[in-house]
Image: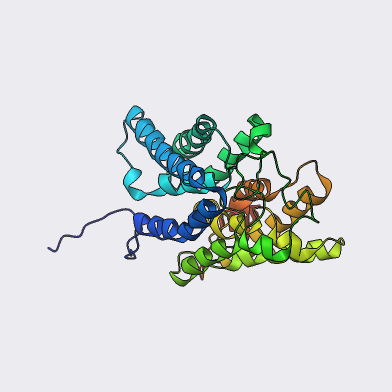
Amino acid sequence: MKEYTVSPSPHIRAGTTTSRIMLHVIIATVPAMIASAVFFGRRALMLIAFCALSAMLWERLIRFVMKRPDSTDDLSAMVTGILLAFNLPATLPVWMAAIGTFVAIVVVKQMFGGLGQNFANPAIVGRIVLMLSFTSHMTHWVLPDNVDAVTSATPLVTEDKFSYLDLFLGHCGGCLGETSKLALLIGAGYLAAMRVITLHAPLAFVGTVYLFSAAVGQDPIYQMLSGGLILGAFFMATDYVTTPVTNKGRVVFGIGCGIITCVIRFWCNAPEGVSYSILLMNIVTPYIDMFTRKKAVGGIYQKDKKEASE
């Protein structure tokens, strides 16, 4: 009798691994890293490297404490550290950045079960916790080539300060990885070409911000090129774990992010809403999946079973 090996799903596996996907993401962030170094100096690279290394250190330590195998070799912790650093101002003290990586890795990721189990994007939550805890430091944006200068207003606060070209190239105040839209789009193009991400959520996100801004009398192009919209849309709203699995769901996710971002930007006491919008949509992602997933032929969902029994 022939013996068969029985194992949990999935039974059909692709050749792509988590570490390979994360390596592609790291490669895609290189243009933005270079741009941050050009505009904000060596301290930008130091802060990015610190966040990446501290994130991996926190993951190794917490996995040891929890008596679980080390998982730093999948590179997901490094990606989280880099993306968190991209959301920080160049002048942020490193000990505050360490708190951010601790929250992202230990609290949001590992305490919920590790990679694949977290309910929200770890880098987003880390950034929001830092913003709420150290507001003055997190809003200390500076102009490029002048990191030691006094606080500079972001493009979202002072709309007559920067031209479209300055915003696109990155010669404006802001966080490390969000200023150069050119660098971010180069990285996003690489991810799309490598089929690491799809463009459903990013285009829905950016398109919604454009249309919403135009509808309420704001400059739509300025809103697209300002703040962390491009960074959030292409590098955070495409997270495999915390965003919908269906293309239709990704479009819904992107539209929701765009609406919430504009509401916060225009009518709330905050200059930026990208992080909050992604976090809120992360929370409702399971419901989006439930209503947009395809039903197998002859299949029946749990809610259908309940209706049939009634």
Residue at 70% of width from left, 56% of height from top? Answer: 226
Say which residue appears at 54% left-offset and 62% top-offset: 183
Q: Residue at x 71, y 58 (%)?
A: 258
Give the image quarter of residue 262.
Answer: bottom right
Please tell me which residue lies in front, 201 or 28: 28
Q: Residue furthest top?
A: 65
Residue 99 image offset from top left, x and y in percent: 52, 31
Q: Is the image coloured rainbow, by chain, by secondary structure, or in one colour?
A: rainbow
Location of residue 199 in the rendering, given as x and y in whole percent from the top left corner: 57, 68
Which image quarter: residue 251?
bottom right
- Frontmost residue, 287 versus 227: 227
Of all residues shown, which one is farthest toward the right?
A: 217
Residue 100 position in % (x across, y down)? 53, 35
Q: Where residue 188 appears, x then y in whole percent?
A: 52, 65
Q: How many marks?
A: 0
Q: Nearer the viewer, residue 208 or 130?
A: 130
On the picture, is 273 further left or further right than 292?
Answer: right
Q: Foreground: 146 or 35?
A: 146
Q: Is residue 308 visible?
A: no
Q: Is residue 271 left or right of residue 49?
A: right
In this view of the protein, can residue 112 be seen by the observer? yes
Image quarter where the N terminus lies is: bottom left
Q: Is residue 127 above or below residue 3?
A: above
